[in-house]
Image: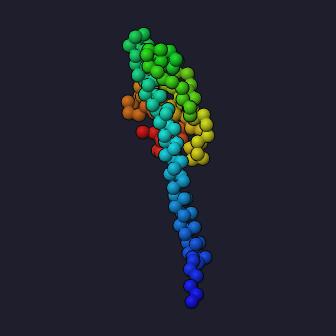
Amino acid sequence: MKKALRGFTLIELLVVVLIIGILAAVAVPQYFRVVERAKCSEGMNWLGGLKTAQETCLIKQGTYCTSYTAAGGYGIMLGTMKYFAMSNITVNTTPGWVITLTRNTPAPAVYGLYVVTYTHPTPTGVLAVTCSTSDCTNDLLP
């Protein structure tokens, strides 16, 4: 007696490929968003350390430091960033300071090369960190 040959039909295989394609179309953008959010957190953590260093500088000198290396000289290890390049610190008379971090490697197409600006203190006192694109502000910032 002959055994019946079993297998998948072409339609069944096409349906499986279609389902996998739909899942990939949804999952890949989410994956890039999560990865970019992790890379952006590097800059946010660095800014937190800089803020602490600047407050220490203000207490010891009476003014904010004008460079992140001087601010880091107070026992706070700021380190270097892999994904961001920082600008010089701009100190104003409020007293306050501003620094910008520029994404130095291409991010996914949604975000591109964005710029994060930290202002301390803010005029309204509500949000200190802003981003150059609305997608960046909505998806990446805390």
Color scheme of the displayed model: rainbow
Say left or right for 104 vs 128: right
For the C terminus, which image quadrant?
top left
Foreground residue, 118 or 107? 107
Going by the image, does 64 lie left or right of 84?
left
Q: Is residue 54 left or right of residue 102?
A: left
In this view of the protein, which residue sits in the foreground, 93 or 75? Answer: 75
Q: Is residue 93 visible?
A: no
**Which residue of the protein is positioned furthest toward the front in this rendering?**
1
Q: Determine the residue positioned at 59% across, 72% down.
A: 14
Question: Residue 138, percent across and down?
Answer: 47, 44
Disc count in the image?
A: 0
| Image position of 52 with respect to 140: above or below | above
Query: Nearest the camera: 13 or 88?
Result: 13
Q: Report the residue at 55% width, 69% height from top.
A: 16
State the image quarter where residue 123 is shown: top left
Residue at horizontal 52 percent and vertical 61 percent from the top: 23
Image quadrant containing the N terminus: bottom right
**Looking at the picture, how far across and down is residue 136, in whole percent?**
51, 42
Task: Inspect this view and state whether residue 48 appears.
Answer: yes
Residue 68, position as x, y percentages in the image: 51, 20
Q: Residue at x 48, y 23 (%)?
A: 78
**In the rendered image of this protein, does residue 5 appear above or below residue 63?**
below
In the image, is residue 85 above or below residue 70?
Answer: below
